[in-house]
Amino acid sequence: MNNNLKVFLGLLALVGLIIIVYWLPNFIHETNPTVCTDQSGQCEHEARMNLLTYLSPVFVILGFVLGAAAFYFFTENKKVEYVEVKPNPEAILKLLSEEERRVVSKIAEEGGKALQSEISMLGGMGKVKSHRIIDRLEKRGVIEKEQHGKTNLVKLAKGLKEVLVK
C-alpha cells in the first residue's frame, strides 16, 4: 500500500476515534430526557438507559476497530535485508597501532601462530616491548596466548585467523 495512503487512512481512523470520544458524551448529555415520563407512562430515563446499554458495546468495538486501524496504518512493516559483508584484512589491521600491526602480520605470516620469542626478534622490538604489545592484543581479544615451554605460543583469535591467514 502506498505510504501516503497509509498515513491518510491512519489519520482518518485517528480523527474518527477522537470524534467518537468527544462526541459521545455530548450526545448522551444533549439527548438526556427533561421529563420523567412520556405520554404512554413509560419512564424516559429508563428507556434511555436501555438504549445506551445496547449501544455501549457498539461504541467500544468501534473505538477498538478505529484504534487498531490507526495503529496498523501508522506502524511500518520494515523489511530486513541481509547483506553479506566480506572481511577486509586491511581494514582490520588499520585499527591497530603500527607495532601491533607488525606483530599481528608476523603471526599471520606464520600461519596464525608464532612463538613470542620469534616476535621479540622483529626489528626494533625487544622482549619487554613485545610482551606489552602481546598483553595489549590479548586483552582486546585479537590474539590468544598459551604457555609453550619457556616461551608463549601466540595465536590469532579464531575469527581473525579466518580473515588474516591466507
Image (cartoon, helix red, strand yellow):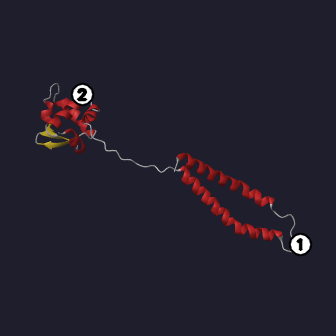
Disc 1, SS? loop
Disc 2, SS? helix
Distance in Å between CA atoms under marks 2 and 1? 101 Å
* Residue 142 higher or lower than 65, as above or below: above
Using the image, tell me which numbered label, if any, was put on residue 148.
Answer: none
Using the image, tell me which numbered label, if any, was put on residue 98.
Answer: 2
Q: Residue at x 31, y 44 (%)?
A: 84
Query: Around disc 1, counting alpha carbons within 10 Å, would you say few (fewer than 14), some (14 to 19), or many (20 or more)?
Result: few
Task: From the image, tell me which residue sits under label 1.
Answer: 39
Q: Residue at x 58, y 53 (%)?
A: 70
Percent across and percent down for residue 25 are 74, 58
**Mark nearer the viewer, 2 or 1:** 1
Percent across and percent down for residue 142 are 25, 39
For marks 2 and 1 on the same chain, the one whose residue lies earlier in the sequence:
1
Q: Is residue 33 left or right of residue 123?
A: right
Q: Nearer the viewer, residue 154 or 135?
A: 154
Amino acid carrying label 2: it is Glu
Amino acid carrying label 1: it is Gln
Q: Residue at x 57, y 57 (%)?
A: 68
Work out which quarter of the rendered image holds the C terminus and state it: top left
Mark 2 and mark 1 in contact? Answer it, CB < 8 Å.
no
Q: Nearer the viewer, residue 133 or 6?
A: 6
Using the rendered view, name the quadrant where residue 22 is placed.
Answer: bottom right
Percent across and percent down for residue 109 are 15, 35
Count of marks overlaid on the render: 2
* Residue 55 higher or lower than 146, as above or below: below
Query: Around disc 2, counting alpha carbons within 10 Å, would you say few (fewer than 14), some (14 to 19), or many (20 or more)?
Result: few
Q: Residue at x 66, y 66 (%)?
A: 57
Percent across and percent down for residue 53 are 72, 68
Using the rendered view, name the quadrant where residue 87 is placed.
Answer: top left
The residue most toward the left is 149
The residue most toward the top is 124
